[in-house]
């Protein structure tokens, strides 16, 4: 009887351990898709939180430093919890074991570090691009560049485990989406220009760049004066007065500056972001055979830790520099000002956690089903556009042409997500 009880107990223990390991190692397509969907939600939300803070006047340097701290915290939590679960073997060492083996797996560590560097540069670029061209357009362009380049590289790195006849039509949907995204931006910019032409000041270009607070309406028949509530400058979303209020509050002033600057920053950010996933892929799967025989591949959790450390360190160095030497005419600050700035810090911390867990889930899904399919999470403009409309009043009171282009862009992203996830394969 005791022997039978012991056998049953042992069976339950072994079965539970297998389920537990599979739950966190993500070995199935279904598990990988679940990871991708949560990653899509998280990665689409954190940019909206940072944009919200910039529009409320918080300096981007302060926000990004807070974001960086919790981003690293998320990676550390994943490494020391999920990365330590399960048996520690020669073929599949846990996180701490691999951390002590850096002298053996340093080529893979360098790939992970390189991935973190380009991710940091890409995220930092988009931080400033949001102010110039808006959250939706920035995310559309960077995500599309990331998918077109990154997915192609990952497809060949993963030995074509994803179905090309499904994968690349999905990439094509992203190409169409980026074209529509550019058209949406041009159409919305024309709509805003028309609204702002109702206002005059010292500038000959509608709303000037020196003192928008002094702007007054020149055509009261065209301007909805009900936008002013109780004599306060609180305008309805999408109106000219609303656009001026946003400009007055925000940390970075963009009126009068060329949108080409924002687009150039956006494309640079997209080029950087297109390389971080292939670099991470190389760090975990060693397709270029840089490791010596018998040295185990870097686990997703160990690679993610190195990846996040390099990304966070670079971001901290650059943003501490930008405190005293700001770029793009952002206001100067100091370390003491940053420490004492608690306005919106909780939202910045939340953004860092969402980004950290979102990236971790993307890599977990990619390791199981192929990193090319995991690039479906780059359809994050689906989520970002929702937050942009809900939180920032983007595209409110725009023209029918803008709404038509916006709807087309979102449809193409939905199609791209479905197609890319359908191409998921099974890593051998």
Image: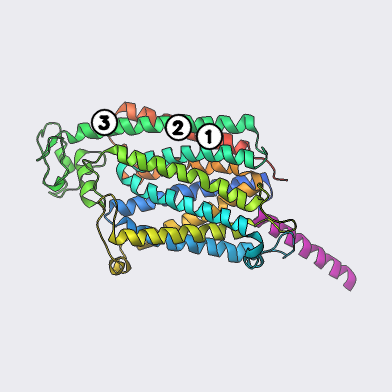
In the displayed structure, would residue 107 be above or below residue 181? below
For the C terminus, give its image quadrant.
Answer: top right
The residue sitting at 47% across, 55% down in the picture is 354
* x, y percent for residue 346: 38, 62
Q: Secondary structure at mark 2?
A: helix
Q: Which residue position is annotated with label 1?
A: 416
Asked if the residue at tag 1 contacts the one at tag 2, i.e. Cβ–Cβ closer than 8 Å, the answer is yes
Q: Is residue 305 left or right of residue 21?
A: left
What residue sits 14% from the left and 46% below the top?
210
Q: Residue at x 51, y 36 (%)?
A: 148
| Labels 2 and 3: the sequence-earlier one | 2
In this picture, is 83 found above or below 388? below
The quadrant holding residue 407 is: top left
Front in this rendered view, residue 385 or 298? 298
* The one of 343 and 290 positioned closer to us in this rendering: 290
- CA–CA distance between discs 2 and 3? 20 Å
Q: Which residue is mark 3?
A: 190
Residue 362, relative to residue 2: is it above or below? above
User: How far is the residue under mark 3 from the one under mark 1?
Assistant: 28 Å
Q: Is residue 17 magenta?
A: yes
Where is residue 56, by image quadrant?
A: bottom left
State which region is magenta: 1-25
Residue 321 visible (yes or no) = yes
Q: What residue is pinned by disc 2?
A: 177
Label whose residue precedes the other's in the sequence (2 or 1): 2
- Number of other residues with Cα within 10 Å of mark 3, as a class: few under 14, some 14 to 19, many 20 or more: some
Q: Are marks 2 and 3 in contact (CB under 8 Å)?
A: no
């Amino acid at each position: 009887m005791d022997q039978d009880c012991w056998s049953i107990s042992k069976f339950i223990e072994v079965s539970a351990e297998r389920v537990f390991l599979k739950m966190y190692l993500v070995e199935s397509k279904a598990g990988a898709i679940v990871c991708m969907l949560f990653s899509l939600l998280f990665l689409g939300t954190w940019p909206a939180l940072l944009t919200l803070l910039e529009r409320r006047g918080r300096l981007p340097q302060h926000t990004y430093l807070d974001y960086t701290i919790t981003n690293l915290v998320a990676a550390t939590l994943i490494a020391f919890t999920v990365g330590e679960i399960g048996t520690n073997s020669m073929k599949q060492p846990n996180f701490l074991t691999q951390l002590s083996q850096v002298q053996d797996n340093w080529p893979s560590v360098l790939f992970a570090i390189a991935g973190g560097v380009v991710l940091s540069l890409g995220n930092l670029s988009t931080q400033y691009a949001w102010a110039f061209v808006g959250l939706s357009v920035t995310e559309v362009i960077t995500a599309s560049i990331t998918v077109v380049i990154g997915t192609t590289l990952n497809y060949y790195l993963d030995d074509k485990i994803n179905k090309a006849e499904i994968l690349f039509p999905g990439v094509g949907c992203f190409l169409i989406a980026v074209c529509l995204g550019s058209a949406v931006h041009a159409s919305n910019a024309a709509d805003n220009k028309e609204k702002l032409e109702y206002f005059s000041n010292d500038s000959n270009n509608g709303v000037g760049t020196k003192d928008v607070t002094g702007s007054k309406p020149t055509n009261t028949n065209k301007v909805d004066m009900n936008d002013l509530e109780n004599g306060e400058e609180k305008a309805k979303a999408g109106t000219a007065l609303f656009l001026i209020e946003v400009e007055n509050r925000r940390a970075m002033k963009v009126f009068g500056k060329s949108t080409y600057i924002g687009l150039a920053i956006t494309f640079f950010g997209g080029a950087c972001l297109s390389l971080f996933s292939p670099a991470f892929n190389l760090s975990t799967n060693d397709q270029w055979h840089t490791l010596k025989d018998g040295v185990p591949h870097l686990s997703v959790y160990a690679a993610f830790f190195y990846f996040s450390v390099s990304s966070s360190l670079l971001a901290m160095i650059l943003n501490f520099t930008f405190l005293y030497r700001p770029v793009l005419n952002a206001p100067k600050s100091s370390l003491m000002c940053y420490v004492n700035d608690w306005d919106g810090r909780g939202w910045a911390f939340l953004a860092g956690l969402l980004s950290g867990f979102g990236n971790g889930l993307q890599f977990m899904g990619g390791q199981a089903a192929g990193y090319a399919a995991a690039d479906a999470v780059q359809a994050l403009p689906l989520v970002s556009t929702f937050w942009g409309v809900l939180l920032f009043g983007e595209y409110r009171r725009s023209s029918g042409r803008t709404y038509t282009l916006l709807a087309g862009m979102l449809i193409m992203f939905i199609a791209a997500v479905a197609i890319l996830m359908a191409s998921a394969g099974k890593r051998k």
